[in-house]
Image: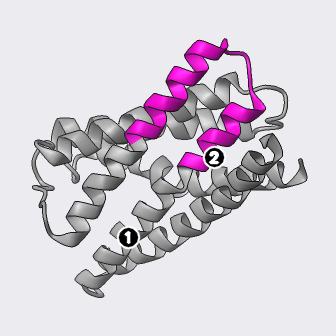
């Protein structure tokens, strides 16, 4: 069972990386003026990227670290809950059932999504920091920095909205470092 979870986590980390790269391309095309369809494709890419984090979370839990079981289980449950909440709201956004005021501090469903992404970032920073010796090299520290950057991204959305400087600073780890981290994690998990 444990080996299956780790294999699933490795495959999912590849999905996180691939969807992240697609998200970068589509957001560049959207801001480059190539049409709103690229904004929607970016939203879909981020949905896939974020949802694929769940098996990676399970893989981290399975491989263990320096955290007692009860806090590790709580962290996993809270992290998965945050991913599912974020993805549900993102799916509603894509379907047109909710809309966001991007130029204002996040409120309503946008605020819930911002808090959820910050919780995902907290999980990521903590899970990487406390992972066992199976997480080798600089991948651990890249995960910590990425996670903290994602927390900043969520905070920026809450403080000033999508176009706030804090959001842009946190957006780099979210859209650039997260796919790189996922690629490196996928490679380490594949070796197992």
Q: Which percent across, then down, holds residue 74?
A: 51, 21
Q: Is residue 60 above or below residue 162?
A: above
User: What residue sits 45% from the left and 69% below the top?
Assistant: 23
Position of residue 134 in the picture relative to residue 61 (left or right): right
Quarter of the rendering occupied by the N terminus: top right
User: What residue sits 16% from the left and 47% below the top?
Assistant: 109
User: What residue sits 47% from the left and 39% below the top?
Assistant: 80
Q: Which percent across, then down, holds residue 81?
A: 40, 37
Residue hosting label 2: 56
Q: Is residue 153 above or below residue 11?
A: above
In front here: 159 or 93? 93
User: What residue sits 67% from the left and 62% below the top?
Assistant: 14
Residue hosting label 1: 44
Q: Is residue 112 above or below residue 73?
A: below
Residue that protrudes farthest toward the right in the picture: 191
**SS state under label 2:** helix
Position of residue 158 in the picture relative to residue 38 (left or right): left
Q: Quadrant of residue 169?
A: top left
Q: How many marks?
A: 2
Q: Magenta part of the protein: which range?
A: 54-82
Say if the magenta span includes residue 91: no
**SS state under label 1:** helix
Position of residue 143 in the picture relative to residue 102 (left or right): right
């Amino acid at each position: 069972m444990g080996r299956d979870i780790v294999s699933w986590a490795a495959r999912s980390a590849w999905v996180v990386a691939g969807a992240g790269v697609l998200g970068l391309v589509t957001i560049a095309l959207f801001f480059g003026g190539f049409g709103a369809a690229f904004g929607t494709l970016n939203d879909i890419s981020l949905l896939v990227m974020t949802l694929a984090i769940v098996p990676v979370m399970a893989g981290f839990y399975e491989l263990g670290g320096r955290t007692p079981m009860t806090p590790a289980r709580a962290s996993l449950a809270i992290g998965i809950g945050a991913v599912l909440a974020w993805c549900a709201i993102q799916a509603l956004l894509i379907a047109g059932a909710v809309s966001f005021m991007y130029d204002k501090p996040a409120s309503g469903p946008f605020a819930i999504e911002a808090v959820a992404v910050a919780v995902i970032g907290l999980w990521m920073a903590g899970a990487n920091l406390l992972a066992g010796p199976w997480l080798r090299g600089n991948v651990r520290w890249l995960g910590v920095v990425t996670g903290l950057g994602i927390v900043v991204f969520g905070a920026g959305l809450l403080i000033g909205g999508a176009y706030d400087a804090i959001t842009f600073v946190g957006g780099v780890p979210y859209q650039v470092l997260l796919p790189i981290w996922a690629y490196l994690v996928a490679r380490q998990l594949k070796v197992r």
